[in-house]
Image: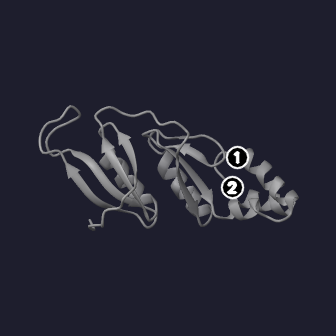
Amino acid sequence: MTKASPTKASTCLWFGTDAEAAVRLYVDLVPDSRIDRIQRAPGAWPGGAAGDAILVAFTLGGQSFQALNGGTPAEYGMAASISVACADQAEVDRLWAGLIADGGGAIMCGWLRDRWGVPWQIVPEVLPRLLADPNPAVSARVFAAMQTMVKLDVAALERAAQA
């Protein structure tokens, strides 16, 4: 693990007791990611035993995050999510499969929840470019196509742009 300098602000995700497992999955899947430090409980606590991870500081895609074991699982709403820009369909597919594995689930328009309930947006880099096309007909077709998708399909988005 690399020691990172502290940042003033970072997102903290709440887990029951699986923070370390979740973070290990996240940093394995998302490029430019690493575990920066793991704070372990010095003694027994309501959510676990001495030596258990209580806080995991990590970098995800170059951004600072924390994962906290709170003893009981949290309910995540949809007002915030982790959004990952993907270079191509292969990266979309790889992240999608890794994040929905073992109990995660697809939502729509590139959104999913991982097995801990954390909401994610897996977005191909081409989508914002196509939605910003100066021709409003192109952006409208791409937007309409996106709304029919669960996992985003780069080829289908490009076909919609060219239709």
- Numbered tag placed on residue 99 in the rendering: none
Q: Is residue 16 left or right of residue 144?
A: left
Residue at (52% x, 55% y) in the render: 95
Percent position of residue 61, x then y: 46, 63
Residue at (53% x, 58% y) in the render: 94
Residue 115: name its quadrant: top left
Residue 130: name its quadrant: bottom right
Percent position of residue 101, x then y: 47, 45
Q: Is residue 89 left or right of residue 131?
A: left
Q: Residues within 10 Å of mark 2 (few under 14, many from 20)?
A: many
Residue at (29% x, 39% y) in the render: 17
From the image, which quarter does the C terminus lie in? bottom right
State the scheme by which the image is colored. one colour
Residue 122: name its quadrant: bottom right
Name the amino acid type tagged 1: Met
As rendered, which of 66 and 142 lies closer to the eye? Answer: 66
Image height of 71 relative to 149, above or below: above
Percent position of residue 40, x then y: 19, 49
Percent position of residue 34, x then y: 35, 63
As rendered, which of 19 and 64 lies closer to the eye? Answer: 64
Where disc 2 sits, the SS reads loop
Disc 2 and disc 1 in contact, CB within 8 angstroms: yes
Mark 2 vs mark 1, CA separation in Å: 7 Å
From the image, which quarter does the N terminus lie in? bottom left
Residue at (40% x, 63% y) in the render: 33
Q: Which residue is mark 2?
A: 153
**Extreme front residue here?**
8
Q: Is residue 126 left or right of residue 9?
A: right
Q: How many marks?
A: 2
Where disc 1 sits, the SS reads loop
Name the amino acid type tagged 2: Asp
Q: Which residue is mark 1?
A: 149
